[in-house]
Image (cartoon, rainbow, N blue to C red):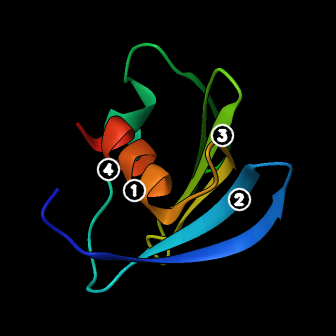
Amino acid sequence: MNVKFSVKKLCQKEGIGNFKLTPEEPIDINLDELQKKPGFETKRPIESVLIMKKGDVTWTISKKNSSILIENVKPDTPERALELLNEIFS
């Protein structure tokens, strides 16, 4: 994905953090395609939100504003959060 994301650290404890990533320009995220990605547990609590889980990491993706919350990022760095973002879009 060739879109730049702003990364905001929400909280951190003992080297594990939660981050909110927001695209700097509007993007269209296809939640239906992401839900089919192998290797992830997925839930769709409402049509515009997808929750993906792999190991201890959880991604919550909102179609409305294209924001992505990544929980349990270890180590808790913005660079690691971006790596995890790329993992779901690769």
Mark 4 and mark 1 in contact (Cβ < 8 Å)?
Answer: no
Indicate which disc, 4 or 3, sits on the residue closer to the N terminus.
4
Lower position in the chain sequence, tag 2 or tag 1: 2
Q: Mark 3 to mark 1: distance in Å?
A: 14 Å
Amino acid type at image mark 2: Asn
The image position of residue 78, as x and y in percent, is 49, 64
User: Label 4, label 3: how many angstroms apart (C-alpha)?
Assistant: 18 Å
Indicate which disc residue 82 carries: 1
- Taking the image as shown, residue 77 lies to the left or right of residue 14, namely left
Regarding mark 4 in the picture, which secondary structure is present there? loop
x, y (%) of residue 18? 71, 59
Relative to 62, say whether 10 is above or below.
below
CA separation, marks 4 and 2? 23 Å
Which numbered disc covers residue 30? 4
Q: Residues within 10 Å of mark 2 (few under 14, many from 20)?
A: many
First in sequence: mark 4 vs mark 2:
2
Front disc: 4 or 2 = 2
Q: Secondary structure at mark 1?
A: helix
Secondary structure of the residue carrying tag 2 is strand
**First reached walking from the N terminus: tag 3 or tag 2:** 2
Q: Nearer the viewer, residue 28 or 84?
A: 84
Name the amino acid, label 3: Thr
Residue named by callout 2: 18
The residue at the point 26 percent across, 72 percent down is: 27
The residue indicated by pointer 3 is 58
Q: Percent from the top left, x then y, of residue 41?
A: 60, 21
What residue is drawn where x is 26% and y is 86%? 25
Task: Check the picture and name the quadrant holding the C terminus.
Answer: top left
The alpha-carbon separation of the residues under discs 2 and 1 comes to 12 Å
Residue depicted at 52% across the width and 21% down the height: 40
Furthest residue in direction top, as rendered: 39
